[in-house]
Amino acid sequence: MENSNLLLGDSFSKFRERPKWILNLIIWIVVVIGSLWLTFAFSDWTELMKQTNPNMNQAQVEQARSFMGPVTVIGGLFSQLFYLLIAFLIVWAIARIFKSNVKKKSIFAGTLFALLISSLVALIVLVIQMIVGLDIVKISITSLNIFDPGNKVLSVFNLQTLLSGYLLSVLLYKTCKLSGKVSIIFGVALVIISIGFGLLGASIQ
C-alpha cells in the first residue's frame, strides 16, 4: 500500500506538511448550503405537511413552507459544522492512540477535505437526479433503493458510504501516517457502523 497510487492520496499527503484549509472550508460551506437548498426546493413539502397535519389549508401550507426554507438550510448547515467537529475529534483521537505525530491543523485540513469530497459527490448525484426527473427524497441512484423507490432498508446500502470509508482510510494513511492495515480497518469499521445504524433507523421508521 505504501507505493500504491491511491485516488486523492497525494492531496491528503500534502495536508501533513501544508495544512491549508480556509478555502476548502468556504467551498464546503457553499456546497452544503447548495445541497440543502436544492433538497428543500425540489422536495414536495406540500404533500409532506398535509400528511403531517391534514387540517392545514393551502395558505397555511405556503406560510409554513416559506418559514421552513431558511430553517432547513441554517439548521442543516450548523448540523454539518457540528459533524465536522466530531469527525475531526474522532480522527485526532485515533491518531493519538496510535502515536501519530501529525499536527492538529493537518488532521482538521484532511478531515475537512474528506467531507468536501463526500459533499461534492452528494451534490453531483443530487443534480443528476433532478436533471433526469428522479424523486430526490424516495430515490438515490447511488443506493440499492433505485430498484425499489422509497425502500428505507435498501437506501442504507449506498456507494457514498463506501466512499466515506475509503476517504477515512486514505486520511489516516496519508495524512496521519498510520499503517495501511490500521487505516483499512477503521475505514471498514466506518462502513459497517454506518450501515448498522442506517438499518436500525430504517427498522424504526
Image: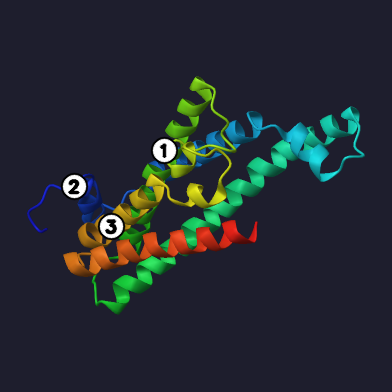
- Residue under pointer 3: 171
Whichever of labels 2 and 3 marks the residue nearer the N terminus, that label is 2
Amino acid type assigned to the residue bearing label 2 in the image:
Asp
Q: Quadrant of residue 98?
A: bottom left
The percent position of residue 124, horizontal first and vertical second, equals 43, 32
Q: How far apart are marks 3 and 1 (CA)?
A: 17 Å
Of helix, strand and loop, which one carries label 3? Answer: helix
The percent position of residue 44, horizontal first and vertical second, equals 70, 32
Whichever of labels 1 and 2 marks the residue nearer the N terminus, that label is 2
Name the side, left or right, on which 162 lies relative to 55: left
Give neighbour class at mark 1: few <14, some 14-19, many 20+ (Cα, 10 Å). some
Residue at the (24%, 65%) spot, across then down: 183
Amino acid type assigned to the residue bearing label 3 in the image:
Leu
Name the side, left or right, on which 153 lies relative to 12: right
Q: How many labels does the image show?
A: 3
Whichever of labels 3 and 1 marks the residue nearer the N terminus, that label is 1
Q: Quadrant of residue 195?
A: bottom left
The answer to which of 101 and 33 lies nearer the viewer is 33
- Residue under pointer 2: 10
Of helix, strand and loop, which one carries label 1? Answer: helix
Of helix, strand and loop, which one carries label 2? Answer: helix
- Residue under pointer 1: 120
142, above or below 152, in the image = above
Residue at the (43%, 65%) spot, across then down: 193
76, above or below 203, in the image = above
Of badges 1 and 2, the one in the foreground is 1
Give neighbour class at mark 2: few <14, some 14-19, many 20+ (Cα, 10 Å). few
Q: How far apart are marks 2 and 3 (CA)?
A: 10 Å
Do callouts 2 and 3 mark residues in contact (Cβ within 8 Å)?
no
The answer to which of 25 and 33 lies nearer the viewer is 33
